[in-house]
Image: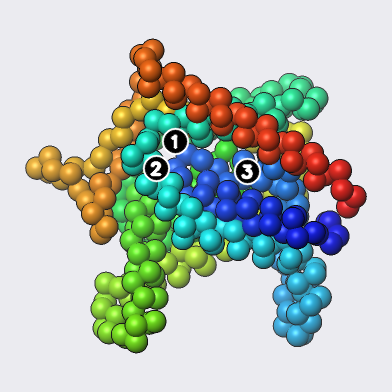
Amino acid sequence: MPGSRTLKDNIFLVIKGLAMGAANKVPGVSGGVVAFVAGFYEEFIYSLQRVNKKAFKLLFNGRIKSFYNYINGHFLSLLFLGMIISYFSVSKVLDYLIVHYQLYVWSLFFGMILGSIYYISKDFGEWKRKTIFALFLGAAAGLSISFLDPATENDNLIFVFFCGIISVSGMTLPGFSGSFILILLGNYVLLLVDSVNALYDTIFDIFSGDFEFIKNEARVRMLKVLGIFTLGSVTGLVTFSHILSYILKQYKSVTLATIMGFIIGSLGVVWPWKETIYKVNSEGALILDSTGKHIIENYQRYLPEFNTQTYIAISYISLGILIVLGLEWYGQQTRKVKI
């Protein structure tokens, strides 16, 4: 793990957290890709897998500083600070942009994923039968997931806990979008919209000195759902990191090939030219969530016609590729610093 960081490094680390948080919120995009391309993926996984028995022993013995240093707390705290800020700010901006400029936003993400594929594959020199098989297996899994039909909403707390475990997969497994999986499980709106809005309202009420929400059964239920979802997310984050840390050490080339496959497969999810299919009731009317937004059911993809809008979208794809190349350059500069 790296030693001391400069103020500039700390600021960039928060910005990386912002990028990861925003990416995790958008269906089809993986925060792990950001970590991978920006050059801190392995440190991220390594730091998370240090949350183990020894870490808790240090914590329970009151050795807070030793615990903080052992889990690379400076790195994780700044990264998660960026993610939290993103969740309550940047991701909201992305929600707006996807509604009003859907084609261009998806084009940008499509370009970033293309750039990510280039980044990961350019220095990969372990092409053998097993790594090629892993690549195709990962791509097939990613594509298969992208064309599944979503389930119906389910607020059973055991299922919500499971959703929490799955939702953080995109942070640890590049190309595997946790938020898109939540759409497939039917709980994207419940867990990333309704429960978060309940938290917003509760925080506002508390600061206003209004504690009537305690008597609101629906609000209390939403807060329970959010709490269980968060617990599941933390469990999944630590569990996945331990598994991936071991796999990366033992089967690094196969793991990287599989990750590449997942990222290639995720192109099906972020294909820019698609029509959003919204949920409707038995009478054919659009179903709205608690915020008044239409609930997304799936996407219908199509090939574009060559017109001005398409050329602009292609420009955004190019911009996405350039952003990843810029991240790659920064990552290379960072890795030149001695660890």
Q: The residue tagged with tag 2: helix, strand or loop?
A: helix
Task: Name the N-terminal-most of marks 2 and 3.
Answer: 3
Is there a contact, CB below 8 Å, between mark 2 and mark 3? Answer: no
Mark 3: amino acid:
Val
In this rendering, the answer to whether 303 lies above or below 328 is above
The mark found on residue 89 in the picture is: none
- Residue in view at x 80 percent, y 68 percent: 70
Say which residue label 2 marks.
Answer: 97
Query: Where is residue 84 shown, x and y percent of the image?
Result: 54, 62
In this rendering, the answer to whether 323 lies above or below 38 is above
Mark 2: amino acid:
Leu
| Mark 3 residue crowding within 10 angstroms, few (<14) / some (14–19) / many (20+) | many
Query: Where is residue 174 shown, x and y percent of the image?
Result: 61, 41
Give the camera-side residue of 64 and 243.
Answer: 64
Find the residue positioned furthest to the top. 306
Say which residue label 3 marks.
Answer: 34
- Describe residue 195's horizontal placement relative to residue 63 as left or right: left
In this rendering, the answer to whether 254 lies above or below 249 is above
In this view of the protein, can residue 47 be seen by the observer? no
Q: The residue tagged with tag 3: helix, strand or loop?
A: helix
Say which residue label 1 marks.
Answer: 105
- Residue in view at x 62 percent, y 34 percent: 323
- Residue in view at x 37 percent, y 22 percent: 309
- Describe residue 276's horizontal placement relative to residue 229 as left or right: left
In this view of the protein, can residue 60 be seen by the observer? yes
Q: The residue tagged with tag 1: helix, strand or loop?
A: helix
Is there a contact, CB below 8 Å, between mark 1 and mark 2? Answer: yes
